Amino acid sequence: MNRTPTHPCCGVVLWCAALLTSCSFEPEIDGVWRTSDDSAVDLSVLLGDGEEGYVQLVAVQYEREVAGLVQFFTQSFNPSDLRTECPCLYLDKAAFRGDSLSFSVTGCDGAPRVGVFTLDPENEDRLRGTLRDPSRESPGEDWVLVRVGDRKQIREEGLERGCEP
């Protein structure tokens, strides 16, 4: 019998290559996401008619489940500009599946709101979506959020503390 000699590691390398090509790597939602610094967004759906400001989403992914909060700023993303009344809302029932983040929050008025955001296929550091009040006919507020930090920033800035000042 005439066999071609093979290195003992060849089997392991081939197995790893097959495993890697059969797996699909899903994007992650971890991080700090913000609306544009250039202009305030309409926060009426959460805070009342005529309210504008800046939105920051802090998200930490645990497999498909997501924990986090949405913060509201008045003039800029400077911590001193965090709203004094209703500075943030905790994410409820948040999940990330495929490229879509869905969650609910309890608004400052105690009523539920629903958010659905999708990763931009051209740029995984950009989320596009809508936050809406399910009790109203209106389509809600369309926002674009850009990832500005990762879990390290969440720890460094103490954002895991939640809604505490």
Image: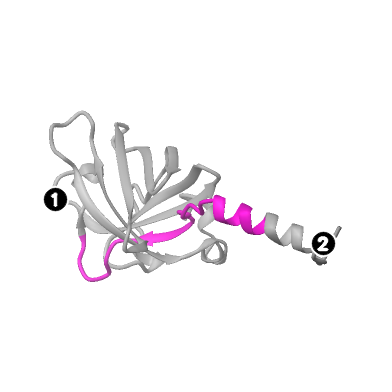
* Mark 1 surroundings within 10 Å by alpha-carbon count, few (fewer than 14), some (14 through 19), many (20 or more): few
- Choose the circle earlier in sequence order: 2 or 1: 2
Q: Nearer the viewer, mark 2 or mark 1?
A: 2
Is residue 57 highlighted in magenta?
Answer: no
Q: What residue occupies the far front of the structure in this picture?
A: 1
Q: Quadrant of residue 145?
A: bottom left
Amino acid at the residue labelled 2 = Arg
72 in relation to 132, above or below: below
Q: Observer-nearest residue: 65 or 19?
A: 19
Amino acid bearing label 1: Gly
Q: Which residue is mark 1?
A: 50
Q: Residue furthest right?
A: 1
- Residue 148, given in percent of the width and then of the height, sits at 41, 67
Q: Classify 10 Å Cα crowding around label 2: few (below 14), some (14-19), many (20 and above).
A: few
Residue 62 image position (x, y, % from top left): 56, 46
> Which stretch is magenta?
16-40
Q: How far apart are the two marked residues, 2 and 1, measured between alpha carbons?
A: 79 Å
The structure residue drawn at horizontal position 50% and vertical position 58%, both measured from the top left corner, is 159
Q: Position of residue 96 (x, y in %)?
A: 44, 44
Q: Secondary structure at mark 1?
A: loop
Tell me what residue is drawn at x 14 percent, y 45 percent: 49
Q: Residue 57 placed where, x, y %?
A: 39, 54
Quarter of the image with the N terminus in it: bottom right
Which residue carries the number 2 mark? 3
